[in-house]
């Protein structure tokens, strides 16, 4: 599944939803966007729109404000902004009908497509809107980091749980701008093997699993996430594998990745622990859906060989592994294999190095504690903090100021307001 994105692709394979009952308008928009992708038509009331968005992952939604459709379009727009806040919404109408255009403006749609204009105008309007959103809002979806580990025992789960705690602490110290209220906090996707170790490390219980999340994808909202997801005392949300791993076979990889993408609408950061996860197709799709993917490996020959094999399989599935980063874990300078050597052998860019602190981590775990919280000056804690800081600085640099108004949109509002006033004053 492809979730809503902020950039148009090179090929015409994307999907757009159009809520309209007017045949000529449907034909016009379908023909106009034919080079970019396909238009899926919905009834104006669009009772099934949540399911359609979850299954189709549209780039944008168009709402027809023409004729008597304004009231239904306004109601649908309110639902979209509440439940799918990152999805671009455009209004359609005819410039000769200033009432419908004004209704669209007042509703707060992202842009307007004039159905009486040349078809190229629809493409240009869509492109400019998506480019504008991408550049001015810094990407509204939260950052998903996938942590890959070719085998168990490399330390992926320890890193994932530690990183979520540190990121959450960083977020709690930063004032939240008023327009950043949709997303909040950090989530740990506890998908590594052995199963549910992340829950164990965080001393947290959960009756709601990743499979439950997939099954409730259409119902997913802030209320469900707040009540169903397990939360560590720090506030970190945790979504683990089910107790019975047989349930995982009941859901598709596409739906699983759709859930990961959807969760990005609600959390500033989510860390997906895929340590020891053996299903290479799911790993590949998760990497494609993530903003960052790091491969965790230690200095052991077994780990290096297993990681090399995993990377070979990912390349065979079309993943450009040069976009991945390497995290060398449990690093011991006395071992005659440097982090740079490992990176060269695996043909990955070296991103981070975490020191070997097995005894300290084990001692903290035996007390039911996390080293990053009880010994912040420990070299491992310091290294994780540095890693978290780099992520935080990269993805939380949004100023919080409302995006600048597009000059075309301002001009259109002035034009329509003028048409409205003149039609009533006359």
Image (spheres, grey):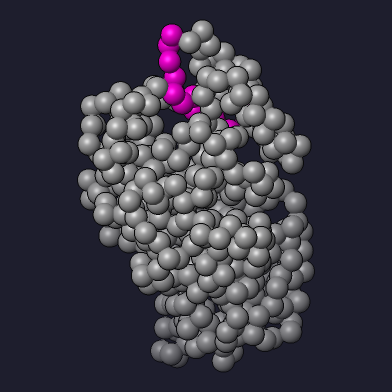
Instruction: Please identify the quadrant where the C terminus is shown.
Output: bottom left
234 is higher (above) or lower (below) than 119: above
Q: Residue at x 74, y 57 (%)?
A: 13
396 with respect to 338 (left or right): left
- Coordinates of residue 266 in the picture (x, y in percent): 42, 60
- Coordinates of residue 115 in the picture (x, y in percent): 66, 75
Assess whether residue 170 is covered by the magenta stretch. no
397 is higher (above) or lower (below) than 217: above
181 is higher (above) or lower (below) than 306: below
Q: Residue at x 34, y 55 (%)?
A: 204
Where does the magenta region start and end? 322-334
88 with respect to 170 (left or right): right
Instruction: Please identify the quadrant where the N terminus is shown.
Output: bottom right
Of 419 and 284, the residue lying toward us: 284
Q: Residue at x 56, y 53 (%)?
A: 6
Assess whether residue 327 is covered by the magenta stretch. yes
Q: Residue at x 52, y 19 (%)?
A: 299
31 with respect to 393 (left or right): right
Is residue 172 among what the camera can see? yes
19 is higher (above) or lower (below) than 331: below
- Coordinates of residue 285 in the picture (x, y in percent): 65, 49
Is residue 392 among what the camera can see? no
Of 68 and 179, the residue lying toward us: 179
Question: Hey, which residue is sitting farthest front in the picture?
Answer: 366
């Amino acid at each position: 599944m492809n979730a809503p994105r902020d950039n148009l692709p090179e090929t015409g394979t994307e999907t757009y939803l159009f809520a309209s009952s007017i045949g000529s308008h449907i034909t016009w928009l379908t023909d106009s966007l034919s080079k970019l992708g396909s238009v899926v038509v919905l009834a104006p009331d669009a009772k099934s729109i949540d399911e359609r968005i979850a299954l189709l992952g549209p780039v944008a939604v168009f709402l027809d404000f023409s004729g008597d459709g304004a009231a239904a379009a306004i109601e649908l727009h309110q639902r979209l902004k509440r439940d799918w806040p990152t999805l671009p919404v455009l209004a359609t109408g005819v410039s000769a009908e200033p009432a419908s255009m004004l209704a669209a403006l007042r509703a707060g749609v992202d842009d307007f497509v004039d159905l009486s204009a040349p078809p190229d105008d629809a493409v240009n309007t869509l492109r400019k809107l998506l480019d504008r959103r991408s550049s001015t809002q810094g990407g509204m979806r939260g950052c998903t980091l996938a942590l890959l580990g070719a085998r168990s025992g490399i330390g992926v789960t320890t890193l994932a749980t530690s990183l979520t705690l540190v990121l959450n602490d960083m977020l709690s110290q930063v004032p939240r701008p008023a327009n950043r209220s949709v997303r909040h906090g950090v989530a740990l996707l506890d998908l590594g093997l052995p199963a549910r170790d992340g829950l164990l490390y965080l001393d947290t219980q959960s009756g709601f699993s990743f499979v439950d999340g997939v099954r409730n994808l259409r119902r997913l909202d802030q209320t469900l996430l707040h009540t169903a997801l397990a939360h560590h005392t720090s506030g970190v949300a945790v979504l683990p594998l089910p107790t019975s791993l047989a349930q995982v076979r009941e859901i598709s990889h596409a739906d699983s990745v759709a859930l990961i993408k959807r969760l990005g609408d609600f959390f500033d950061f989510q860390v997906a622990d895929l340590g020891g996860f053996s299903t290479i197709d799911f790993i590949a799709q998760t990497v494609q859906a993530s903003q960052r993917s790091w491969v965790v490996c230690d200095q052991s020959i077994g780990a290096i060989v297993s990681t090399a094999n995993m990377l070979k399989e990912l390349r065979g599935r079309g993943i450009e592994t040069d976009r991945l980063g390497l995290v060398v874990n449990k690093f011991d300078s006395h071992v005659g294999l440097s982090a740079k050597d490992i990176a060269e052998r695996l043909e990955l860019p070296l991103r981070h190095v975490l020191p070997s602190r097995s005894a300290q981590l084990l001692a903290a775990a035996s007390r039911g504690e996390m080293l990053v919280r009880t010994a912040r000056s420990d070299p491992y804690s310091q290294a994780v903090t540095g890693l978290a800081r780099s992520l935080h600085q990269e993805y939380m640099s949004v100023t919080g100021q409302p995006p600048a108004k597009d000059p075309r949109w301002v001009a259109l509002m002035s034009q329509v307001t003028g048409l409205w006033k003149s039609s009533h004053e006359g």
